Image (spheres, helix red, strand yellow):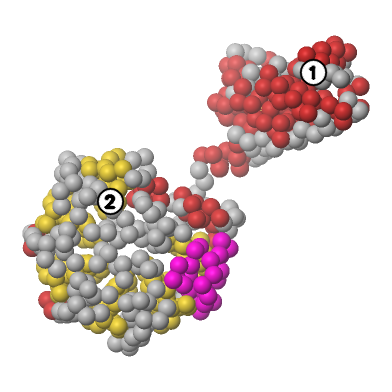
């Protein structure tokens, strides 16, 4: 499952809120805006709200998600964002909504007034059922269930496909050589447009200064032109970056063309390509490609699940596809794209599958699956021998070296309290410790006895966070007793900083004589008793 918290903006949400998310999209010039849809088909937005792109009816930014009541209950099937930003959203009943920046009529409502809240785009789309949307920098496209392509908005380079460079204030059907074609997918670069038709052909129009239309030249196109460089192959997926494009064929072959300033074509150099060029030729079959108009980053996933990235990656120019440790292309954009937007709306699948760590945590102290129990202070703690042997050298020796305990179903523990021993066993299942500083002293004793160095460090951390004037000397005594040098130094400094208060506590006067003597001598050397 993809983790939406890989995008920093989602770290604003509480962990218990995340399971409600079904679909999400991070956008904006700094990836500072987000929209998400819940399992109940409620739409929420939060972030910077540039150009009213959150659609909340005002221009206020928010770090707390706000609900777009107008869209409640509508099932979202497609979502895209521009650079203004402006937002297009299509629902399963074929309606199209738009809001945000509208300086070039990219909202399709015939005006250039800012869209402060979602409105239905209906001009020239009456009775049309929209199935997919795409946004360029300041132009928009929509695909109908009949394979028709509509475009509107900024048209300085012909990206609307109308045959001219006049801005288009309302949706207009892109015809020309697409007139009798059945389009199945649409994508936008910043100022260019591509359409994939059902027979695997690709058509492009708009700005072509870097060759992003793949036509073999760098002249702008006012109306759709077929990419003859892809003749003979059947394309099944197209994506566009800021000024480059990628196409994936039904045989798993990958082609790239357009701008290459950052190595985003993956050709091993930074030369632009005016025609499609096959890349990743020595790799296995490619099953997915990724790019988006606001970045210069590219990614691909192979049949065996390997994910590659190239182009602008965290400021570096990666000119050849680089194998990552990611399991999906989405994570490339979360961690390496600039800005770290989503290249597509992310569908988050929630199921009952548990990771190994989650399953172990769930089975701790479960009498139904346990094969061993400890008795501490008359209470039982249920565990699994295999887990203990894997996680702890003490138990590995106990169960493999013919100790008496190896033959027992119940092991009695009398050296430690129930709270301490349970916390220790739970740590072996979860890597976490939840104890008060006072109980952590007992766990520190256990960690020292069992030679568990990491647990010892965790205990010291808990104790440091919980130190007070009242318990400082007790904690110092424990640190000395268990040879925790860093903790001893920390407690000593705390006692010195609060010397008058600490020497008036009960713990100070109940301490062992030798320790008290050592403390006074050490404090004296530090100048504690100088007039």
Q: Secondary structure at mark 2?
A: strand
Residue 71 image offset from top left, x and y in percent:
49, 76
147 left or right of 45? Answer: left
Which residue bears the numbered disc 1? 527
Q: Nearer the viewer, residue 431 or 86?
A: 86
Badge 2: how crowded within 10 Å, few (<14), some, or many (20+)?
A: many
The residue depicted at 53 percent of the width and 75 percent of the height is 58
Badge 1: how crowded within 10 Å, few (<14), some, or many (20+)?
A: few
Residue 242 image offset from top left, x and y in percent:
27, 59
Which residue bears the numbered disc 2? 298
50 within the magenta span: yes
The answer to whether residue 481 is above or below residue 305 is above
Q: CA distance from mark 2 to mark 1?
A: 63 Å
515 within the magenta span: no
**Residues rendered magenta in the picture:** 47-72
Q: Nearer the viewer, residue 303 or 223?
A: 223
The residue depicted at 60 percent of the width and 16 percent of the height is 397
Q: Quadrant of residue 206?
A: bottom left
User: Is residue 246 shown to the viewer in this render?
Assistant: yes
Residue 260 image offset from top left, x and y in percent:
20, 51
Residue 447 image offset from top left, x and y in percent:
68, 22
The answer to whether residue 483 is above or below residue 148 is above
């Amino acid at each position: 499952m993809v983790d939406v918290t890989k995008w920093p903006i989602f770290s604003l949400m509480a962990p218990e809120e995340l399971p409600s998310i079904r679909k999400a999209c991070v956008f904006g010039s700094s990836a500072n805006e987000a929209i998400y849809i819940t399992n109940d088909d409620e739409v929420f937005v939060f972030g910077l709200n540039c150009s009213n792109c959150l659609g909340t009816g005002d221009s206020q930014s928010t770090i707390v998600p706000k609900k777009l009541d107008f869209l409640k209950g509508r099932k979202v099937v497609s979502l895209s964002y521009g650079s203004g930003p402006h937002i297009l959203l299509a629902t399963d009943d074929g309606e199209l909504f738009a809001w945000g920046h509208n300086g070039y009529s990219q909202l399709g409502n015939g005006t250039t007034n800012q869209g402060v809240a979602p409105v239905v785009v209906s001009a020239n789309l009456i009775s049309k059922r929209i199935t997919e949307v795409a946004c360029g920098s300041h132009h928009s496209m929509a695909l109908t269930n009949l394979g028709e392509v509509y475009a509107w908005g900024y048209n300085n380079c012909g990206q609307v496909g109308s045959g001219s460079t006049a801005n288009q204030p309302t949706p207009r059907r892109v015809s020309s050589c697409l007139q009798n074609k059945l389009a199945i997918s649409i994508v936008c670069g910043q100022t260019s447009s591509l359409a994939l038709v059902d027979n695997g052909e690709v058509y492009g129009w708009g700005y072509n200064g870097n060759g992003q239309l793949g036509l073999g030249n760098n002249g702008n196109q006012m109306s759709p032109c077929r990419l003859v460089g892809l003749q003979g192959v059947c394309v099944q997926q197209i994506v566009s970056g800021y000024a480059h494009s990628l196409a994936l064929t039904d045989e798993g072959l990958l082609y790239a063309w357009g701008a290459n300033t950052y190595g985003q074509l993956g050709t091993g150099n930074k030369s632009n390509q005016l025609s499609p060029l096959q890349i990743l030729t020595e790799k296995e079959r490619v099953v997915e490609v990724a790019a988006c108009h606001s970045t210069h980053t590219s990614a691909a996933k192979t049949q065996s699940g390997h994910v590659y990235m190239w182009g602008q990656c965290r400021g570096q120019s990666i000119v050849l596809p680089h194998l990552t440790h990611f399991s999906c292309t989405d994570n490339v954009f979360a961690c390496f794209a600039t800005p770290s937007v989503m290249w597509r709306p992310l569908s988050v699948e929630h199921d009952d599958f548990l990771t190994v760590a989650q399953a172990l945590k769930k089975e701790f102290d479960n009498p139904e699956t346990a094969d061993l129990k400890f008795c501490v202070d008359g209470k039982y703690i249920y565990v699994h021998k295999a887990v203990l042997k894997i996680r702890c050298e003490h138990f590995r020796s106990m169960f493999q070296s013919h100790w008496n305990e190896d033959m027992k179903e119940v092991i009695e523990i009398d050296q430690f309290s129930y709270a301490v021993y349970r916390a220790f066993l739970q740590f072996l299942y979860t890597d976490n410790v939840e104890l008060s500083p006072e109980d952590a002293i007992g766990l520190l004793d256990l960690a020292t006895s069992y030679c568990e160095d990491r647990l010892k460090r965790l205990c010291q951390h808990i104790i440091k966070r919980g130190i007070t004037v009242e318990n400082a000397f007790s904690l110092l005594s424990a640190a000395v007793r268990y040879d925790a040098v860093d903790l001893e130094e920390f407690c000593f400094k705390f006692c010195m900083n609060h010397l008058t208060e600490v020497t008036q506590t009960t713990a100070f006067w109940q301490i062992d004589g030798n320790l008290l003597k050592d403390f006074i001598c050490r404090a004296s050397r530090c100048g504690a008793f100088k007039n």
